[in-house]
Image: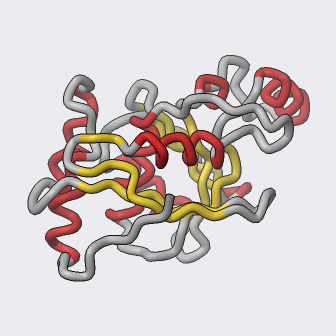
Amino acid sequence: MTGTCSSGMTRRALLGAFAATTLTAAPTFGNAAGFLRGAGDIRRVRMYSGRTGERIDMIYWIEGQYIADAVKEINYFMRDWRTDGIANIDLRTVDIMAAAHNLLDVSEPYMLLSGYRSPKTNAMLRSRSGGVAKNSLHMKGQAADLRLSSRSVHQVARAAIACNAGGVGRYSNSNFTHMDCGNVRSWGG
């Protein structure tokens, strides 16, 4: 399901609308809500996968409701491409990704490097790198590793940190930013 923003909406109105990228039941998502509150409530995600060649560009939330077909497509898109394992992606992570993307003021989609990871994939990656957590939130569908070619790792991380809504890791040597809906924290350089 692909959606586009209505052409009559200004940047300020879109930012205002997107402030609701928080879940009201999750008090740590307060800053993300404050950034974009205003005209209406829509949430949009834009990503592509260099591994699978797939792309998504869709509105996944309208006026307080997640769109079931869009959520299903996000779950599939963010699957473990190595095993084709699919998990329910925690939508708080998608909300953080979308809010940070809007704060960056870019139209370029994120490149998704890693979304959901099966325990098997996580163990394999962990055996190759000391930077992979044993109990990674990727295995719970609560994390994403993302890249924007038009923005630095530090710029993407600053936007995600501004949301004050989860974990943000800067992996400058590998050119990606980690975002998750776990405890608010940041790391890396």
Q: Residue at point 54% right, 34% down?
A: 89
Residue 184's place in the image compared with 76, above or below, is above
Q: Give the tally of numbered discs.
A: 0
User: Seen in the image, is 19 located left or right of residue 187?
Assistant: left
User: Seen in the image, is 93 located left or right of residue 87?
Assistant: left
Q: Position of residue 80 (x, y in %)?
A: 75, 38
Q: Residue at point 63% right, 29% down?
A: 87
Q: Nearer the viewer, residue 71 or 152?
A: 71
Which color scheme did the rendering employ for the protein?
Answer: secondary structure
Q: Residue at point 27% right, 39% down?
A: 22
Asked where in the image residue 148 lies, by quadrant, the reply is bottom right
Asked where in the image residue 43 lies, by quadrant, the reply is bottom left
Q: Nearer the viewer, residue 136 or 19?
A: 19
User: Seen in the image, is 50 located left or right of residue 69?
Assistant: right
- Residue 133 visible in the displayed image: yes
Residue 59's place in the image compared with 109, above or below, is above
- Residue 169 visible in the displayed image: no
Asked where in the image residue 150 lies, by quadrant, the reply is bottom right
Residue 38's place in the image compared with 165, above or below, is below
Q: Residue furthest top?
A: 135
Q: Position of residue 20 (x, y in %)?
A: 21, 46
Q: Position of residue 154 (x, y in %)?
A: 50, 60
Q: Residue furthest left?
A: 38
Q: Position of residue 120 (x, y in %)?
A: 84, 23
Q: Nearer the viewer, residue 138 or 88?
A: 88
Q: Residue at point 79% right, 44% down?
A: 81
